[in-house]
Amino acid sequence: MTTPLIRIEHASKTFTLPDGGRFDAVRDVTLDVREGDIFGLIGKSGAGKSTLLRLFNLLERPDAGAVTVAGRELTALSKHDLRGARRNIGMIFQQFNLLQNATVFDNVAFPLRIHGGQGAEQVAVRVKQCLELVELAAKADSYPAQLSGGQKQRVAIARALASGPAVLLCDEPTSALDAETTRALLATLRDINRRLGVTIVIVSHELSVLAEICNRVAVIEDGAIAEEFALNQPAGHNAPRKTALGRELAAFNAASALAGAHQELSYA
Ligand SMILES: Nc1ncnc2c1ncn2[C@@H]1O[C@H](COP(=O)(O)OP(=O)(O)OP(=O)(O)O)[C@@H](O)[C@H]1O
């Protein structure tokens, strides 16, 4: 058994509320993500999916437990070393989070410039590579306001990949996009996973998104893992699911596999 690329061990996160109360958003989660996975986190609104995802790069620091990525225990690193380790973990968000007053080029160059160590020419070469990857090289001089939602998210992907990370975290990456743009964006993510070998962890409330792209999912309920299972298994390899969401997702997955098989047959 190979060592997982990401290991979350007994992680918990409690928020203190304005009224002084406490809320357990993540409760004793242990989770492995293997290299090359497209790993999905599903759950109802408020289940703790985004908080859990933000533990993967310590955007939220767990109150207890350990987070290890590519052999480095992030929870044990100094601030300085954590900054370096984070270059191995890109992240994209539902609302893209681009710098509005900067061009597409400057948005993608931003993480390279703040980290330093590369000359302007090297930065330009890397930005061009990343924009070509998401098919937006022609938009280098545009501003975010001039782009469609799908294009903005592809700029965000290019920015997230600029430092050559092994992991890409995606927090509801398609929730602000229409169905067609969603399909195109998922194709880009799949391509990045297959061609560049980038491991992806994705939070989405859209079952169709997860059924289409993930090879493994965890169902989150009340901040804990209710069940975890593989998708796109050969027929007969699917054990009964424990949760309603798990059953719904498995049915979605089976239906889209069947649709795919029909499509292949009609092309044969
Ligand atoms: N900084 C915070 N302070 C207090 N409570 C928070 C904080 N961040 C999240 N929470 C609470 O923790 C719970 C889990 O939030 P989280 O965003 O992780 O859920 P989610 O499953 O991603 O939901 P959604 O799909 O609605 O985004 C929610 O009840 C939320 O209100």
Image (spheres, rainbow, N blue to C red):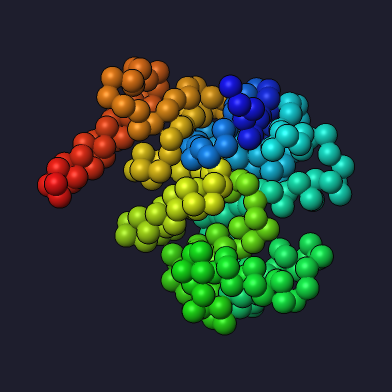
- Residue at horizontal 70%, vertical 68%? 110
Q: Is residue 231 left or right of residue 105?
A: left
Which residue occupies the foreground of this view, 76 or 61? 76
- Label count reads 0
Which residue occupies the foreground of this view, 257 or 96? 257
- Residue at horizontal 18%, vertical 46%? 263
Looking at the image, the residue that sits furthest to the front is 268
- x%, y% of residue 99? 64, 70
Q: Is residue 128 left or right of residue 120?
A: left
Q: Against 252, is 197 above or below?
A: below
Which residue occupies the foreground of this view, 166 or 73? 166
Asked which quadrant contains residue 1, the reply is top right
- x%, y% of residue 217? 46, 32
Which residue occupies the foreground of this view, 176 or 14? 176
* Residue 169 visible, this angle: no
* Residue 238 visible, this angle: yes
Looking at the image, the residue that sits furthest to the bottom is 141
Q: Is residue 83 left or right of residue 160?
A: right
- Residue at horizontal 64%, vertical 61%? 162
- x%, y% of residue 46? 53, 37
Q: Against 127, is 21 above or below?
A: above
Q: Against 258, is 115 above or below?
A: below
- Residue at horizontal 41%, vertical 52%? 186
- x%, y% of residue 75? 78, 35
Q: Against 69, is 185 above or below?
A: below
